[in-house]
Image: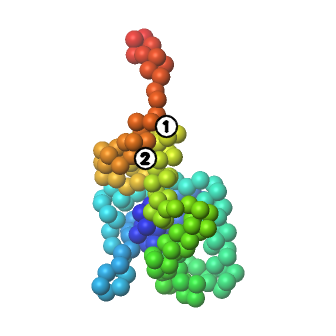
Amino acid sequence: MRTGELGALTWNDVDLTNKTIDINKAIAKSSKGHIIKETKSKAGMRNISINPLVVKHLREYREYLNQMGNIFNLSSWVFSEPSDTSQHLPITIWSNRVAQAMSDCNIKHSAHSLRHSHASNLLMNNCPLIQVSHRLGHADASITLKVYSHFLEELTVDFDKYLPKIHA
């Protein structure tokens, strides 16, 4: 997800039973403070799958919020102010926390870099480009190809494996 999409998540957007997240809005900084807006493009409105480990951590995080006295409801922000779940946690705070954690691990990247790492890993493990494009919320697969083509160029394909299927 884009940073603004992450920041705008509510628990209503997270379906732990079906292991999905509905990305349907973003949060952005403006001269009037933080505003909720549409995603970057229509393609940004998407439903993505999450793996069981993410589901486990989200359940634990939600339980932690409850134990801290921050009783959540479905309209509560996933990344909320610790003292008031009706208030979202500013993007800069959690983005800086992720950057600090990455720095502590000697990883020289930003929170947004996780998006690129995720996409790159999917592509390097032969996930179809169109699926990665949809997951990233790109309006067109050519955008994904333009940004990540260097990873695809590194992949070698054994055409001898495919040619017999074509001539059969």
Residue 52 lies left or right of residue 150; in this view the side is right
Residue 156 position within the rendered picture, expressed as x and y whole percent measured from the top left: 46, 29
Q: Which residue is mark 1?
A: 126
Circles 2 and 1: CB atoms closer than 8 Å: no
Residue 101 lies left or right of residue 86; in this view the side is right
Q: Earlier in the sequence, mark 2 or mark 1?
A: 1
Q: Are there few (<14), some (14-19), or many (20+) residues within 10 Å of tag 2? A: some
Q: Secondary structure at mark 1?
A: loop
Q: Residue at x 61, y 68 (%)?
A: 104
Q: Which residue is mark 2?
A: 132
Residue 118 position within the rendered picture, expressed as x and y whole percent measured from the top left: 50, 52
Residue 29 position within the rendered picture, expressed as x and y whole percent measured from the top left: 35, 78
Q: Is residue 15 shown to the viewer in this render?
A: no
Check disc 2 and give the amino acid type.
Val
Residue 109 lies left or right of residue 34; in this view the side is right
Q: Is residue 147 shown to the viewer in this render?
A: yes
